Amino acid sequence: MTFDVDAVARAIAEAQIGISGRATAISDGLGLAMKRLSASDQTSRVVVLLSDGVDTSGKVPAVDAARLAAEHWIRIHTIALGPEDLENQPKSRDAVDAKTLREIAETSGGATFRVRGMEDLMAMAATLDQIEPNPSTRPPMMYQQPLWIWPAGAALFLLGLIGWRRR
């Protein structure tokens, strides 16, 4: 879990398809997330699923897992990540099953997003922030502003004044 959108964007930009294997168990991942969130006392329970939507090794259909999530008041927001859709390019090896991801989100009461590049990712993050606002649990933001310039400028001015008075 993170609020660091830049780190997530960087990880997505550097991601390689198939690096962790070709099998995906979306329903198993959702089940694990539900187990952790069910034990939580938070009022808002949300899962953000970033996937190509192709469940190749799960024992339970992902839409059924989403139905179970809805019963436990857990919303699943899905992010379809990839350049092509399975609906338009059915023979493409790396096409995204946007339809399944849309069904998962709708079944659980979440939203679905289509991300093809960094612009889409930034727009998705802004929209997700509006859908799921929770400022009380966010870590404090630290804005650093260099202030050394003021004492350095004063010291330079005083050195110049001392040098001018000695002449």
Image: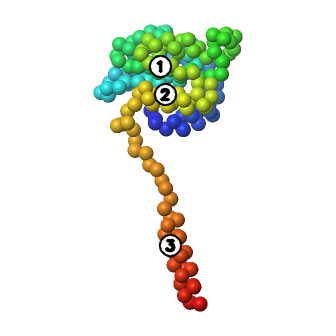
- Three-letter amino acid code at disc 1? Ala
Q: Secondary structure at mark 3?
A: helix
Task: Quote the CA–CA distance across marks 1 and 2.
Answer: 10 Å
Residue lying farthest right?
A: 91
Task: Quote the CA–CA distance across marks 3 and 2.
Answer: 46 Å
Query: Residue 100 falls in which quadrant of the image?
Result: top right
Residue beneath the point at 35% across and 18% down = 73
Q: Residues within 10 Å of mark 3 (few under 14, many from 20)?
A: few
- Three-letter amino acid code at disc 3? Ala
Q: Are marks 1 and 2 in contact (CB under 8 Å)?
A: yes
Residue beneath the point at 54% across and 87% down = 165
Q: Secondary structure at mark 1?
A: loop
Left or right: residue 70 compared with residue 122: left
Q: Residues within 10 Å of mark 1 (few under 14, many from 20)?
A: many
Nearer-N-terminus badge (3/1): 1
Q: Is residue 73 above or below residue 124?
A: above
Q: Which residue is label 2 attached to?
A: 127
Residue lying farthest left?
A: 41
Q: What is the x, y in percent for residue 11?
A: 58, 34
